[in-house]
Amino acid sequence: MRIFLSIALAMGLFAGASAKSLVVGAASSLGPPLKQIIAAFEREQGTEVKLVLASSGKLFAQIQNGAPFDIYIPADVRYLQSLPPGRLKAPAQVFAKGQLALFLPQRLHLTAQDLSILSRPEIRRIAVANPKHAPYGRAAIEALKRSRLFTALQTKLVYGQNVAQAAQMAVFAADAGLVDLGSAMRLQGQVWVVPASLYEPLEYGIGLLSDQPAALSFVDFITTPKARSIFRAHGLVEP
């Protein structure tokens, strides 16, 4: 039911857009940087962009069920590679890599040096994104397993629908969070970057789903120095 509601909302955005507008479906972790990039693109190109944010997996399901996105930007390029043949109008591009981070609220007065700090008794709940459809959730679970902590900590885990929601839960409904670095940097507390060796790479991909010339221009704009500098400021690195 939720998938169909999301599709309806996305189609409503599309129907309300002008002929020159674009509809972009993007991973929730990209919200803040993409809003800046879209504002710059709209100023330079004169094309309105409608942004739909959700977990990468939920957006994938919406596309499979007919949501009319012009561009799809998941936090895991494998979602683009899993689309039916012919759905992409051009080969998918990897434009950035994400970083998993451990966030600890200020009220705990704790500083992390590794993930074992999550075993402390004052950390009763650990917020992560739902690993079923959020790449950062999968990365969080993988990092805990590779650190041999998952079995001991799994009863502490609480799940957000996407990584942006998990980051908010880490502040208000939990005692820690394993989230994207960009979200962790925007919160008040301690941030520790999880070693990349503990999880599979989080490769952000961008896929062209329509023939609109403006959509191709937006894909090109994502890789400009201006866009890359914005992504870097939000914790993303070049692939």
Image (cartoon, grey):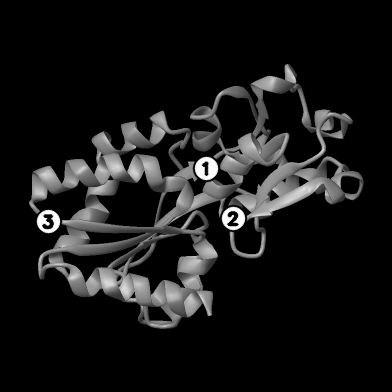
- Give how far across and how far down residue 234 sits, in percent: 43, 33
Q: Is residue 89 above or below residue 233?
A: below
User: Residue drawn 40% across and 29% down?
Assistant: 233
Q: Which element carries disc 3, helix, strand or loop?
A: loop
Query: Which mark, residue 135?
Result: 2
Q: Answer yes or no: do the residues labelled 2 and 1 have beta carbons within 8 Å?
A: yes
The residue tagged 3 is 47
Crowding at mark 1 (Cα within 10 Å: few <14, some 14-19, many 20+) = many
User: Residue drawn 11% across and 43% down?
Assistant: 43
- Amino acid at dot 3: Thr
Q: CA distance from mark 2 to mark 1?
A: 10 Å
Q: CA distance from mark 2 to mark 3?
A: 30 Å
Q: Is residue 219 left or right of residue 177?
A: left
- Amino acid at dot 1: Gly
Q: Answer yes or no: do the residues labelled 2 and 3 have beta carbons within 8 Å?
A: no
User: Residue drawn 51% across and 59% down?
Assistant: 55
Farthest residue, direction front: 172
User: Residue drawn 50% across and 76% down?
Assistant: 3
Of the numbered discs 3 and 1, the one sitting upstream in the chain is: 3
- Give how far across and how far down residue 25 sits, in percent: 37, 62
The residue tagged 1 is 98
Most foreground residue, 164 or 173? 173
Instruction: Say if residue 199 shows up in the picture.
Output: no
Of the numbered discs 2 and 3, the one sitting upstream in the chain is: 3
Q: Which element carries disc 2, helix, strand or loop?
A: helix
Crowding at mark 3 (Cα within 10 Å: few <14, some 14-19, many 20+) = many
Q: Is residue 188 left or right of residue 90?
A: right
- Give how far across and how far down residue 185 sits, in percent: 52, 28
Query: Which mark, residue 155?
Result: none
- Amino acid at dot 2: Pro
